[in-house]
Image (spheres, rainbow, N blue to C red):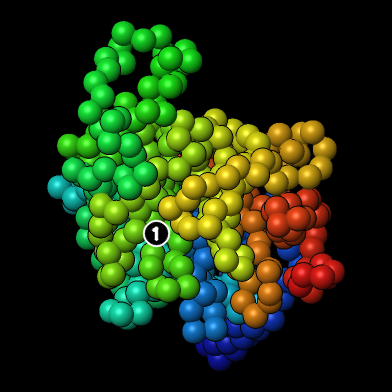
Amino acid sequence: MSNSIKQHGSIIAIVGCVLMACTQSNKVFTPGELWPDNKGVHINAHGGGVLYHSNRYYWFGEHKIEGKAGNKAYVGVHCYSSGDLYNWHDEGIALSVVDDTTSLLVKECIIERPKVIYNAKNKQFVMWFHHELKGMGYKAAMTGVAVSDKVTGPYTYLKSVNPNKEYWPVNFADSLKRKTVDMDTIKQWSAAWQKEVVDGAWLRRDKEKGQMARDMTLFVDDDGKAYHIHSSEENATLHITQLADDYLSFTGYFARALEGKMNEAPAVFKRGDKYYMITSGCTGWKPNAARSAVADHPFGPWTELGNPCRGTDEEVKTTFHSQSTYVLPVKGKEDAFIYMGDRWTPENAIDGRYIWLPIEFEHDKPVISWFDEWRLKELPGQF
Ligand code: DGJ
């Protein structure tokens, strides 16, 4: 084959790829199906969240690899961008794990549920994520933070912490601060034991070293105040903390929410002047029934609204076989929110699917129903 024919062939191949990328045109959401990015590869951004910035959506999530081991961080946090929410462009790895064994961000640690927010004051993008240390299972229960001047990264890892060391939540009674109880003497999961958990047994235990932080999300209010919301106290109780003005640290100004109710996978959003939360129970990678709650302030008090899912028993009991990760407000549309959930596949982590469904409201309660496929503009009264 002559050189010119070979060159011609590769030019055609390149033009073909470029055309494919330009003409990538998903026009519909198909929850649970493979979701190809601009390169035709299933999106790899699990436990993710979305930031809207300069007219574009950025989806950040856990980059998983094949097999069971794939739930550990061998790569880092993956970023994709989109103008229309259907078609996603691979922006590469925003935060990379490292080979340096002296770094907490060493390969094979666990990075889950990364979320990115924009700090207008410092013109910086701030990423927080649930961070477990290599070889320690889920014991460390930390939250990590990384920062970048560019939305797609690379993000510079700053630190991981057990937050709110030495602080009491604003809604914790003084009498309980002084309480002493030996939890080993009470039968685990008995009513008395659970009462002690609600009364802050784990909160008091962890006050000196910092609180546990597992499943997490971020929420930025209209006034620019940012909140870090995470499962704490052995996953029994949610902690909601106002971050510092630069969003890079905890202030110690925090509240407990849904005490003793065992919530994971929090996703917080605002509709009108009400704050909503969708969460799950705690069943590892297996799906369970979603929960929802409403409040007048991020610190609560939060009123439970029950399971937002509508459908068959199986769908309602398993949240359409998914677990919440984020609620995405659609820009330019009033009251338009998308439930983002993960359908985990722990045996082959990379194959996890995304369950995106519209959130509707009935009497100010969020409701989620199944659609095999749906479009933003199709849903009456909302999109
Ligand atoms: C449920 C959590 O929501 C996930 O993020 C992950 O931590 C799994 N548990 C691990 O079992």
The residue pinned by badge 1 equals 227
Give the vertical position of 123 relative to 86 (above or below). below
Along the horizontal axis of the image, is 218 left or right of 174? Answer: right
Quadrant the C terminus occupies: bottom right
Q: Nearer the viewer, residue 202 or 113?
A: 202
Residue positioned 37% across, 44% down in the render: 171
Along the horizontal axis of the image, is 201 left or right of 262? Answer: left
* Amino acid type of the residue tagged 1 in the rendering: Tyr
* Callout 1 crowding tier (Cα within 10 Å): few <14, some 14–19, many ≥20: many
Give the vertical position of 153 relative to 355 (above or below). below
> How many numbered marks have been drawn onto this rendered protein structure?
1
* Place of residue 232 in the rendered image (x, y in percent of width and height, measured from the top left): 38, 38
* Place of residue 178 in the rendered image (x, y in percent of width and height, measured from the top left): 22, 28
Residue positioned 26% across, 47% down in the render: 163
Give SS at disc 1.
strand
Q: Nearer the viewer, residue 27 or 147?
A: 147
Q: Nearer the viewer, residue 103 or 149?
A: 149
Quadrant the N terminus occupies: bottom right
Residue at far left of view: 102
* Mark 1 vs ligand 1: CB below 8 Å: no
Residue positioned 79% across, 33% down in the render: 313
* Place of residue 4 in the rendered image (x, y in percent of width and height, measured from the top left): 56, 91
Along the horizontal axis of the image, is 231 left or right of 21? Answer: left
Residue positioned 53% across, 47% down in the render: 302
Choose top left, top right, bottom left or bottom right for residue 98: bottom left
Give the vertical position of 258 relative to 294 (above or below). above
* Place of residue 308 in the rendered image (x, y in percent of width and height, measured from the top left): 70, 46
